[in-house]
């Protein structure tokens, strides 16, 4: 989003006095629900003017859209717990305006409890920290949309019309715009709000799409460029019981695809007597599902949430802060290569990633050893950290870790003799200012649990050696039981599964990690060192990462590398599926129906010798011929390759243009265009002539060029950015309507 353009009032923008002001919402999914909520809550500002609102949603699922359709398969889940999803503005949202009574703005969990009381359906019988099925979220969105829409319609002079239609173009026509639907109908509008959400790429319009389409066509395989809606795109006529399915991707979309083709085909999961799940096939599943991706890894299990839903327990950051980014920019930043911006640019891997890694390590060890040790580590790391902010560049993403690791070594050397009974606690305490007792007890609780902590405390109180009570105990959460163990390892964070020379070896190593990851997730995002570090940095501090990267905050080359390397890592570490869902994926791998033996860097191609479409694992030697290839990953927004014509037509008309991060050498070939639109601070698109198209506002996926991490459900009690962005539009909307009177 570009912020340096002046935004003059468009004299043609005001509507003709005496007729209703005409607002069009293109896209009727979750953001439309939030928009209609705020519009109806503030409708008192309408005064004596009329308002005509038209909502266009091609699926007819108003409030939910395709991604959250109430009619979708029951095998897909949200990756956020019910108490952290809402539908309306609340007291934390600055400048929201009038709020609805508390009972009219439930969280998703509260909505489910009400629906369960009415229906007794088990899918609504959820606790606050349970993971709802995605169709349940769709039901709630549709219900809340209807309530907000009815509220808007009750206001004198306000009308709301719903159109089950696909918008393919927007035509300027004098002082107004015309919404063009696929059947050729045109609807006049004074203002348009684009809420189109995610789309996917037309294989004919992207290089990778053409390559995959060519490989499948030559090998006689069916190419599915996008799996949604699952019931339609992956029905029995596309994927039969004899087919081997290639699943390109191992993230949330791939998990949806895999569960739809297994559990959705009548298979079932059952608890084993000793714990864990086993899968029982129905016979209607495909013969095999070969899942592969560049990393070779599924998304990691989201940890049990132990933080308050209002964000008060989110990690505040010690090293990775906005102030640190500002200092880096001032001391190390490079001037932007064109004169239209004054903000200095960083290199993410060189300047910001070391702060991310240091923050993860510090939070990891603070979770393992407790607050006393965390303070010690921060103090020890501060000199090298401040030197780094001032411009020192020792090199490497883990360049700030030596001081932290040395402090951990000191903690272990001090505590270990006390644990073994080789030194009295009193004598050990005389050597250090931090609490040896607190650190030891915290470590015991983290690794072994509260009962072991109680026994060790009793030993310390009686001056007895504590190690004996720990002999023979294992960690219930797959943590190393040695005091010097559980070290933070950035390389293991990125690549937790080592290299393997055969498919069976890689399968075994991946399963070993996934089972361990399940145990870590069960311990939660406050108590497990690995999950606390990932959740606290890549989720709680995601806004700081965006602050560093967004608006050309990093160079063109660095932004290209960031999107290639780190967005996928973010998704694995902080945006994964529920542990219950990942347990099903593990069961499918153990069953054998789900083949993960390709390992990392697998590639699909046409094999001349067999005349088949094959996927090959270059590191494991795996090779599987495919009957169906499903691109089970979300495509980044890019109007140049979009399967739907709306944004291509807007670009051809000159109403929008792509956002560009200019390359450092000034050559156009070095520029980076991620695919998102060039927008003002008010989310109005920049036309190809450089002017502002103030009659159009764009929210969501199309803004993901200059900005990052934009797709999310509304979160309660968190002053959530989704609602803040809507308020930016809403303030401009009411100002435009007032000017039109």
Image: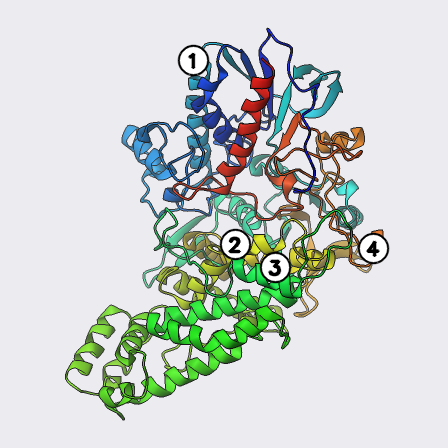
Q: Mark 2 points at which residue?
A: 542
Q: How far apart are marks 1 and 2 (CA)?
A: 40 Å
Q: How far apart are marks 3 and 4 (CA)?
A: 26 Å
Q: What SS does tag 4 mark?
A: loop
Q: Earlier in the sequence, mark 1 or mark 4?
A: 1
Q: Distance between the residues labelled 2 and 4?
A: 30 Å
Q: Name the residue under label 3.
A: 566
Q: Distance between the residues labelled 2 and 3?
A: 12 Å
Q: Name the residue under label 4.
A: 666
Pair 3/1: label in front:
1
Q: Name the residue under label 1.
A: 154
- Foreground residue, 424 or 648? 424
Q: Position of residue 170 (x, y in %)?
A: 71, 23
Pair 2/4: label in front:
4
Does 339 sit above or below residue 589? above
Pair 2/3: label in front:
2
Category of crowding for the residue at label 2, using alpha-carbon neighbours closer than 10 angstroms: few (below 14), some (14–19), many (at least 20): some
In which quadrant of the rendered view does residue 8 lie? Answer: top right
Pair 3/4: label in front:
4
Disc 1 to disc 4: CB gap under 8 Å:
no
Q: Position of residue 247 (x, y in %)?
A: 62, 51
In which quadrant of the rendered view does residue 185 lie? Answer: top right
Q: What SS does tag 1 mark?
A: loop
Category of crowding for the residue at label 1, using alpha-carbon neighbours closer than 10 angstroms: few (below 14), some (14–19), many (at least 20): few
Category of crowding for the residue at label 3, using alpha-carbon neighbours closer than 10 angstroms: few (below 14), some (14–19), many (at least 20): some
Category of crowding for the residue at label 4, using alpha-carbon neighbours closer than 10 angstroms: few (below 14), some (14–19), many (at least 20): few
Q: Position of residue 80 (x, y in %)?
A: 44, 46
Q: Distance between the residues labelled 1 and 4?
A: 56 Å
- Foreground residue, 636 or 229? 636
Disc 3 to disc 1: CB gap under 8 Å:
no
């Amino acid at each position: 989003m570009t912020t340096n353009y002046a935004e003059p009032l468009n004299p043609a923008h005001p509507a003709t006095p005496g007729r209703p002001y005409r607002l069009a919402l293109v896209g009727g999914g979750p953001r439309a629900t939030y928009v209609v909520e705020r519009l109806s809550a503030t409708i008192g500002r309408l005064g004596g003017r009329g308002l005509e609102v038209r909502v266009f949603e091609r699926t007819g699922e108003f409030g939910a859209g395709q991604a959250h359709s109430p009619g979708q398969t029951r095998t897909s889940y949200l990756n956020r717990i019910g108490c952290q999803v809402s539908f309306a503005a609340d007291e934390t949202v600055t400048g929201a305006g009038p709020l609805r009574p508390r009972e009219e703005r439930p969280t998703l969990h509260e909505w489910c409890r009400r629906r369960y009381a009415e229906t007794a359906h088990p899918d609504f019988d959820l606790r606050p920290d349970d993971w709802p099925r995605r169709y349940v979220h769709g039901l709630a969105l549709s219900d809340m949309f209807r309530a907000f829409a009815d509220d808007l319609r009750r206001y004198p002079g306000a009308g709301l019309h719903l159109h089950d239609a696909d918008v393919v173009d927007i035509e300027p026509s004098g002082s107004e715009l015309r919404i063009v639907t696929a059947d050729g109908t045109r609807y006049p509008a004074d203002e348009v709000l684009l809420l189109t959400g995610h789309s996917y790429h037309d294989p004919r319009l992207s290089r990778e799409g053409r390559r995959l389409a060519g490989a499948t066509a030559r090998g006689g395989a069916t190419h599915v460029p996008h799996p949604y809606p699952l019931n339609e795109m992956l029905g029995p006529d596309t994927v039969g019981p004899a087919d081997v399915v290639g699943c390109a991707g191992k993230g949330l979309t791939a998990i949806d695809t895999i569960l739809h083709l297994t559990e959705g085909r009548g298979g079932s999961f059952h608890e084993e007597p000793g714990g864990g799940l086993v899968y029982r096939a129905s016979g209607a599943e495909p013969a095999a599902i070969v899942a592969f991706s560049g990393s070779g890894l599924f998304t990691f299990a989201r940890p049990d949430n132990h933080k308050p839903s209002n964000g008060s327990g989110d990690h505040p950051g010690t090293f990775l802060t906005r102030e640190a980014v500002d200092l880096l920019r001032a001391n190390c930043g490079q001037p932007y290569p064109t004169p239209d911006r004054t903000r200095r640019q960083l290199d993410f891997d060189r300047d910001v990633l070391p702060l991310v890694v240091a923050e993860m390590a510090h939070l990891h060890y603070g979770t393992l050893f407790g607050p006393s040790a965390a303070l010690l580590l921060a103090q020890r790391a501060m000199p090298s950290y401040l030197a780094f902010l001032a411009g020192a560049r020792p090199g490497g993403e883990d360049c700030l870790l030596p001081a932290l690791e040395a402090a951990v070594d000191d903690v272990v050397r001090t505590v270990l003799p006390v644990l073994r009974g080789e030194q009295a606690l009193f004598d050990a305490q005389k050597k250090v200012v931090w609490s040896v007792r607190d650190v030891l007890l915290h470590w015991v609780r983290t690794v072994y649990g509260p009962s072991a902590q109680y026994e060790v405390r009793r030993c310390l109180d009686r001056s007895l050696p504590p190690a004996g009570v720990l002999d023979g105990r294992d960690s219930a959460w797959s943590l190393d039981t040695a005091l010097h163990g559980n070290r933070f390892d950035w390389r293991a964070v990125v690549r937790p599964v080592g290299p393997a020379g055969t498919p069976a070896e890689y399968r075994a190593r991946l399963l070993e990690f996934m089972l361990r990851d399940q145990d870590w997730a069960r311990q939660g995002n406050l108590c497990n060192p690995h999950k606390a570090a990932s959740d606290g940095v890549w989720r709680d501090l995601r806004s700081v990462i965006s602050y560093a990267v967004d608006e050309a905050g990093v160079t063109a080359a660095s932004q290209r590398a960031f999107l290639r390397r780190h967005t996928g890592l973010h998704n694995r570490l902080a945006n994964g599926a529920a542990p219950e869902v990942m347990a099903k994926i593990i069961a499918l791998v153990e069953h054998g129906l789900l083949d993960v033996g390709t390992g990392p860097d697998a590639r699909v191609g046409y094999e001349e010798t067999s005349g088949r479409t094959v996927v090959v694992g270059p590191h494991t030697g795996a090779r599987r011929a495919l009957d169906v290839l499903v691109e089970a990953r979300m495509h980044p927004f890019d109007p140049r390759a979009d399967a739907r014509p709306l944004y291509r037509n807007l670009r051809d008309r000159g109403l929008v243009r792509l956002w560009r991060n200019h390359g450092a050498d000034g050559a156009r070939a070095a520029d980076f265009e991620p695919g998102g639109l060039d927008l003002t601070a008010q989310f109005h698109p920049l036309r190809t002539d450089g002017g502002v198209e103030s009659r159009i506002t764009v929210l969501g996926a199309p803004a993901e060029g200059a900005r990052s991490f934009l797709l999310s459900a509304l979160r309660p009690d968190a002053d959530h950015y989704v609602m803040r962005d809507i308020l930016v539009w809403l303030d401009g909307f009411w100002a435009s309507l007032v000017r039109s009177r």
